[in-house]
Structures are given as C-alpha cells and as structure tokens.
Amino acid sequence: MSEYPPGSREDREMLTKMPMERLLDFFFLQIRNLWRVDGLYFLGIEEKFGTDAATEIDAGVWEIMAKIEAKSLQKMFQVGESPDIATIIELLRKSSWALDQPFKKVEISDTRAILRIDKCRTQEARLKKELGEFPCKKVRFNYLKNFAKTLNPKVKVNCLVCPPDKHPKNLWCKWEFSI
C-alpha cells in the first residue's frame, strides 16, 4: 500500500474497479472541486473584507501550500535534494495548481524554463461574473517561488507578466525559472 493511503480499503477497491479513463476524469473533477472551494473562500473573504485582504490571505495560504506540495511530490516521486530545472518543472506540472491549468505551455532548457498560462479559468470566471481581473501576481509568485525554492534554494523565479500587469488577450501570465 502507498505511503499516502487515501481513504479506506473499500474506497481504494471501488476506485481500482473504475476504467482508467473514468478514474482520470474523476481525479481531475476532484482537483477542480478543490479549486472551486478555494475560489468560494476567496470570494467570501473578498466580499466581506475587500480584494486586498482576500489577496493577502490567499497569498499566505498558497505560500504554505507550495512548500507542502513540493515536499510531498518530491517524496512521492523520489526526487533527490536540489533537483535541476527540468525536474522542478516536472514536479510542478504534477501539482494541484498546474493540473488545474489545462492551457499551459512549458519550454525547458538546461538552466531555464518558461511557464505560460494562455487561458485562465479563474480569471475568465471572474470576468464572466463581472468581478474584474484578479490581481493574482502576489499569490502566484509566492506559490511558484516557494515551490521551486523548497526543492532547490538556488532557483530564481521571475514574473514576466501576471495581473495586475497589462497582458495580451492570449496570455494571462508568464514565469521564468532559472538557476
């Protein structure tokens, strides 16, 4: 049995009986549901205390989540200390944040990686609800920086563009990772 046993033996048996395609759909649904909870909490805080307070709280939560998630993925996938950029990006792509970003592109070289989000569900949902763009730069920067630095303290993360920055319609955010 895995070191991270989710649920009871009966739950595991029920899931192992699902066809792989259905199991993957179910897995992504659960990630989406976690993001829905995150969004609902944010909206509740924003409504009661304003966008600045909600953003401050959200940034702190994701800063901590980055460290937890990076360490958990590092352990689960047996990645050694101070991995290279490609390995860090490989783990990041397995994170709950990245798995909920289907419209991402990654370019990787030996010393550098670029991650871009061309279409953002969170931002598009806010615009649809006429809430305006979420100034997510602080939240996302804290998450990405702490995720990478937890794995390798030599990694630098640079924001190339992210709201509230002006950005083209086909790009929400773009991040550079380097050593």
Image: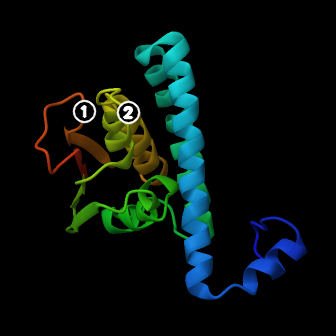
Q: Which residue is drawn at the image coordinates 60% and 86% (left, top)?
A: 20
Residue in front for this viewpoint, 168 or 129: 129
The image position of residue 86, as x and y in percent, is 32, 68
State which quadrant residue 36 falls in.
top right
Q: With respect to residue 83, does 137 lie above or below?
A: above
User: Residue 102: x, y in percent?
Assistant: 36, 63
Numbered mark located on residue 163 in the image? 1
Residue 148 visible, this orientation: yes
Residue under numbered circle 2? 129
- Return the x and y of residue 58 as percentages of the image width and height: 50, 29
At label 1, the amino acid type is Pro
Query: Is residue 170 toward the left or the right of residue 88 in the image?
Result: left
Drawn side of residue 126 relative to residue 22, left or right: left
Query: Which residue in the rendered view is the most extreme toward the left?
Result: 168
The residue lying at 33 percent from left, 49 percent from top is: 155
Q: Is residue 143 above or below residue 109?
A: above
The mark found on residue 88 in the picture is none
User: In the displayed structure, would residue 2 be above or below residue 56?
Assistant: below
Please report the residue visible at 45 percent of the width from the left and 57 percent of the height from the top.
100
Q: Amino acid at mark 2?
A: Lys
Residue 77 visible in the shown view: no
Where residue 96 sits in the image (x, y, percent)?
Answer: 51, 56
Residue 2 occupies quadrant: bottom right
